[in-house]
Image (spheres, grey):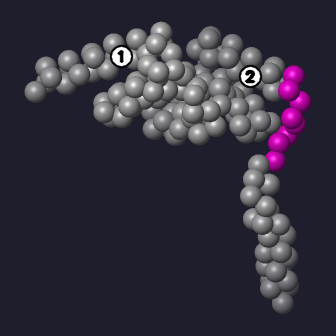
Amino acid sequence: MRVLLAFAFLILTALPVAAYPGESEKKESDDPAEVTELYDTGYQKLKAEDFRGAIASFQAVLRRDPKHAMAYTNMAYSNRQLGKFRKAIRQYKRALSIDPELAEAHEYMGRALLEVGELEKAKEYLATLARLDEKLAKPLAAAIERAERALLASD
């Protein structure tokens, strides 16, 4: 009987969370200054090539602001630098679902896709990036061109 009551309690306490979409995304704090400070710390760690530390900082940002597209982008960049390309691709997709016009996410997504051999998908991101920011598009276009030449040379 106790087990049944405990089970019923668990079900009933879980229902309100499931009933309100997004409610499970609890924020630790929504103080913009704190979020900015955490983001800046993560960015400094990224620049210092402390990619694991940067990821931890960007995760802290996202706990406070789950819609911070640049935190997802820089966390993905850090994962890409650690060779975790599939994880990075998922995080870039998340950033782009929040901000479809985020040029940096398009550029880095294209580079991550090249790393896993998805040349045609990388070209799709390049096309969007060229519309958003021609300057950022040039290095990705060059990387795609190198990948195409390497592919032709291996045939």
Tag shown at residue 28: none
> Few, some or many C-alpha atoms within 10 Å of disc 2 (few <14, some 14-19, many ≥20)?
many
In this picture, residue 154 sits left or right of residue 74: left
Region of the chain picked out in magenta, as a range: 26-33
Tell me, yes or no, whether the two marked residues, 2 and 1, touch with CB atoms within 8 Å: no
**Image spot of residue 124 (x, y percent):** 38, 31
Amino acid type at circle 2 is Tyr
- Give the vertical position of 133 relative to 123 (above or below): above
Helix, strand or loop for disc 2: helix
Visible residue check, residue 56: no
Q: Residue furthest front?
A: 131
Amino acid type at circle 1 is Ala
Mark 2 vs 1, N-terminal side = 2
In this picture, residue 6 sits left or right of residue 111: right
For image coordinates 84% across by 69% down, the residue present is 13
Q: Quadrant of the C terminus?
A: top left
**Image spot of residue 42 (x, y percent):** 70, 21
Label 2 – label 1 distance at C-alpha: 29 Å
Residue 32 part of the magenta segment: yes
**Image spot of residue 148 (x, y percent):** 23, 22
Q: Which residue is mark 2?
A: 39
> Few, some or many C-alpha atoms within 10 Å of disc 1 (few <14, some 14-19, many ≥20)?
many
Q: Residue furthest left?
A: 155
Q: Which residue is mark 1?
A: 141
